[in-house]
Image (cartoon, rainbow, N blue to C red):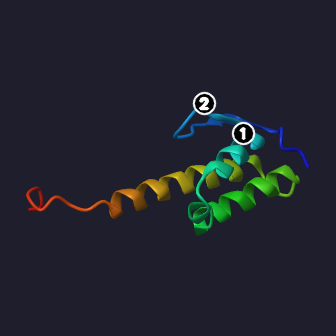
Protein backbone atom coordinates (compact mmCIF):
# COMPACT_ATOMS: atom_id res chain seq x y z
CA UNK A 1 0.00 0.00 0.00
CA UNK A 2 1.35 3.41 -0.92
CA UNK A 3 -0.41 6.27 0.83
CA UNK A 4 2.37 8.67 -0.17
CA UNK A 5 1.28 8.67 -3.83
CA UNK A 6 0.83 12.28 -4.96
CA UNK A 7 -2.19 13.67 -6.77
CA UNK A 8 -1.46 15.13 -10.23
CA UNK A 9 -2.99 18.36 -8.91
CA UNK A 10 -3.46 19.11 -5.20
CA UNK A 11 -6.99 18.63 -3.90
CA UNK A 12 -8.28 21.82 -2.21
CA UNK A 13 -9.58 21.14 1.29
CA UNK A 14 -12.06 23.37 3.13
CA UNK A 15 -9.65 23.76 6.05
CA UNK A 16 -5.88 23.83 5.86
CA UNK A 17 -3.52 23.26 2.97
CA UNK A 18 -4.60 21.22 -0.06
CA UNK A 19 -4.10 17.46 -0.05
CA UNK A 20 -0.92 16.65 -1.96
CA UNK A 21 -1.02 12.88 -1.35
CA UNK A 22 -3.47 10.10 -0.57
CA UNK A 23 -2.27 10.28 3.05
CA UNK A 24 -3.14 14.00 3.25
CA UNK A 25 -6.66 13.25 1.99
CA UNK A 26 -7.07 10.31 4.39
CA UNK A 27 -5.88 12.45 7.31
CA UNK A 28 -8.47 15.10 6.45
CA UNK A 29 -11.28 12.55 6.18
CA UNK A 30 -10.38 11.20 9.63
CA UNK A 31 -11.10 14.68 11.06
CA UNK A 32 -14.70 14.59 9.83
CA UNK A 33 -17.40 13.68 12.34
CA UNK A 34 -18.38 10.00 12.19
CA UNK A 35 -21.91 10.68 10.84
CA UNK A 36 -20.39 12.70 7.99
CA UNK A 37 -17.87 9.96 7.16
CA UNK A 38 -20.69 7.42 7.04
CA UNK A 39 -22.51 9.31 4.29
CA UNK A 40 -22.57 7.48 0.96
CA UNK A 41 -20.43 10.12 -0.77
CA UNK A 42 -17.65 9.86 1.80
CA UNK A 43 -17.76 6.06 1.89
CA UNK A 44 -17.27 6.07 -1.88
CA UNK A 45 -14.42 8.60 -1.63
CA UNK A 46 -12.74 6.47 1.05
CA UNK A 47 -13.05 3.36 -1.11
CA UNK A 48 -11.51 5.21 -4.06
CA UNK A 49 -8.61 6.34 -1.84
CA UNK A 50 -7.99 2.78 -0.66
CA UNK A 51 -8.18 1.47 -4.24
CA UNK A 52 -5.64 4.06 -5.39
CA UNK A 53 -3.33 3.28 -2.45
CA UNK A 54 -3.49 -0.43 -3.30
CA UNK A 55 -2.91 0.22 -7.03
CA UNK A 56 -6.38 -1.09 -7.84
CA UNK A 57 -7.78 2.24 -9.00
CA UNK A 58 -6.60 5.43 -10.66
CA UNK A 59 -5.53 8.47 -8.66
CA UNK A 60 -7.95 10.55 -10.72
CA UNK A 61 -10.90 8.56 -9.34
CA UNK A 62 -9.65 9.17 -5.79
CA UNK A 63 -9.47 12.90 -6.50
CA UNK A 64 -12.93 12.96 -8.10
CA UNK A 65 -14.38 11.03 -5.15
CA UNK A 66 -13.09 13.56 -2.64
CA UNK A 67 -14.17 16.59 -4.67
CA UNK A 68 -17.63 15.11 -5.22
CA UNK A 69 -18.02 14.33 -1.51
CA UNK A 70 -17.13 17.95 -0.68
CA UNK A 71 -19.64 19.27 -3.21
CA UNK A 72 -22.40 17.05 -1.85
CA UNK A 73 -21.57 18.03 1.74
CA UNK A 74 -21.80 21.71 0.81
CA UNK A 75 -25.11 21.20 -1.02
CA UNK A 76 -26.54 19.28 1.96
CA UNK A 77 -25.42 21.98 4.39
CA UNK A 78 -26.95 24.74 2.29
CA UNK A 79 -30.22 22.83 1.88
CA UNK A 80 -30.42 22.23 5.64
CA UNK A 81 -30.17 25.91 6.60
CA UNK A 82 -33.57 27.38 7.52
CA UNK A 83 -34.86 30.08 5.23
CA UNK A 84 -35.57 33.55 6.57
CA UNK A 85 -39.35 34.03 6.03
CA UNK A 86 -38.76 37.74 5.33
CA UNK A 87 -36.46 36.86 2.40
CA UNK A 88 -38.69 34.14 0.93
CA UNK A 89 -40.61 35.24 -2.12
> Mark 1 = which residue?
24
> Mark 2 = which residue?
17
Q: Quadrant of residue 15?
A: top right
- The image shows residue 81, relative to residue 40, as above or below, that is above
Marks 2 and 1 close (CB-CB < 8 Å)? yes
Q: Quadrant of residue 69?
A: bottom right
At which x and y percent is residue 79? 34, 62
Q: Residue at x 56, y 61 (%)?
A: 36
Q: Is 83 situated left or right of 28 in this image?
A: left
Please report whichever mark, 2 or 1, sits nearer to the chain's N-terminal start: 2
Task: Say few, some or many: other residues with alpha carbon within 10 Å of mark 2 (under 14 / 14 to 19 / 20 or more).
Answer: few
Secondary structure type for disc 1 = helix
Quarter of the picture containing the C terminus is bottom left
At which x and y percent is residue 23? 77, 42
At which x and y percent is residue 59? 75, 47
Give the spatial CA distance, label 2 vs label 1.
9 Å
Q: Is 51 situated left or right of 25 in this image?
A: right
Q: Is 69 situated left or right of 43 in this image?
A: left
Q: Is 49 situated left or right of 15 in this image?
A: right
> What numbered label is drawn on residue 78?
none
Q: Closest to the observer: 85 or 44? A: 85
Total labels: the figure holds 2
Q: Quadrant of residue 54?
A: bottom right
Q: Residue at x 66, y 58 (%)?
A: 45
Amino acid sequence: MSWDRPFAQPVPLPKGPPAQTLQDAADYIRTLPQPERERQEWRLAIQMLVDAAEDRGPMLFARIGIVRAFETSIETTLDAKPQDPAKAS
